[in-house]
Amino acid sequence: MKTQPVKDITPHQMQKIVDGFGLEDNEIRNFTVNEVIHAYKTGFDLGLEQNQKLLANQIKANATTAAQDTLKVIEYFKQIGIKPLSAHLKIATKFSVEVLMTVSDSDYVKEEFSQVYTFVNALKESNTNELYSINFKFVNRGESFDFDSVKTYGYATSFKPLETN
């Protein structure tokens, strides 16, 4: 939540605010430079630690949701007679993931394959919110498919139930 700057506050109103917090004149004092630096550093360190924990929790939550969404796509593939060979996860941002799925050359050219895009678009629309979005990409995996290039493009992990490499 963003705070708004205080505008047009009179000295009398400011004194009421100070009084409202119960501060006495002897409690208001000047702080040394070292006290200010220590307070700033302590607050900064605590904020950084909390931010890192929130980021890690968000990425874990999104990876879990991506795994669930990937399972739904795999089930849909099976319903239309296509066998996915592998799925690879890429963390695009803290709120966005990408899944690269591979299928055989023969499955990739099947007429039924185009139905997957409709299914995936509906899945994406139903699950996208301000904290999570997913994009699916599909490629045919021929003999020249290079798993190292998948990792080079940032797909750091494979979906375990499909892992064949």
Image: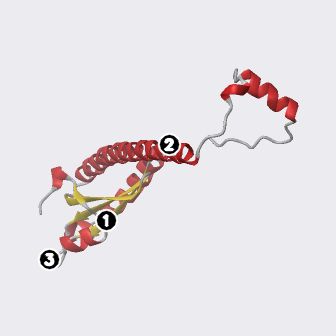
Indicate the position of residue 150 as horizontal and vertical percent values.
Answer: 25, 69
**Location of residue 117 by image quarter:** bottom left
Q: Quadrant of the N terminus?
A: top right
**Location of residue 146 by image quarter:** bottom left
From the viewer's side, name the closer residue of 126 and 83: 126
* Secondary element type, mark 2: helix
Residue type at mark 2 is: Gly
Please name the residue that numbered disc 2 is placed on.
43
From the viewer's side, name the closer residue of 46 and 129: 46
Dot placed on the residue nearer the N-terminal end, 1 or 3: 1
Please name the residue that numbered disc 1 is placed on.
138
Query: Residue at the spot x=39%, y=54% of the render?
Result: 120
* Secondary element type, mark 1: strand
Residue type at mark 3 is: Glu
Indicate the position of residue 103 as horizontal and vertical percent values.
Answer: 22, 64
Q: Quadrant of the C terminus?
A: bottom left
Indicate the position of residue 148 as horizontal and vertical percent values.
Answer: 20, 72
Residue type at mark 1 is: Phe
From the viewer's side, name the closer residue of 70 and 83: 70
Query: Residue at the spot x=35%, y=64% of the render?
Result: 137
| Residue at the left extreme, as displayed | 165
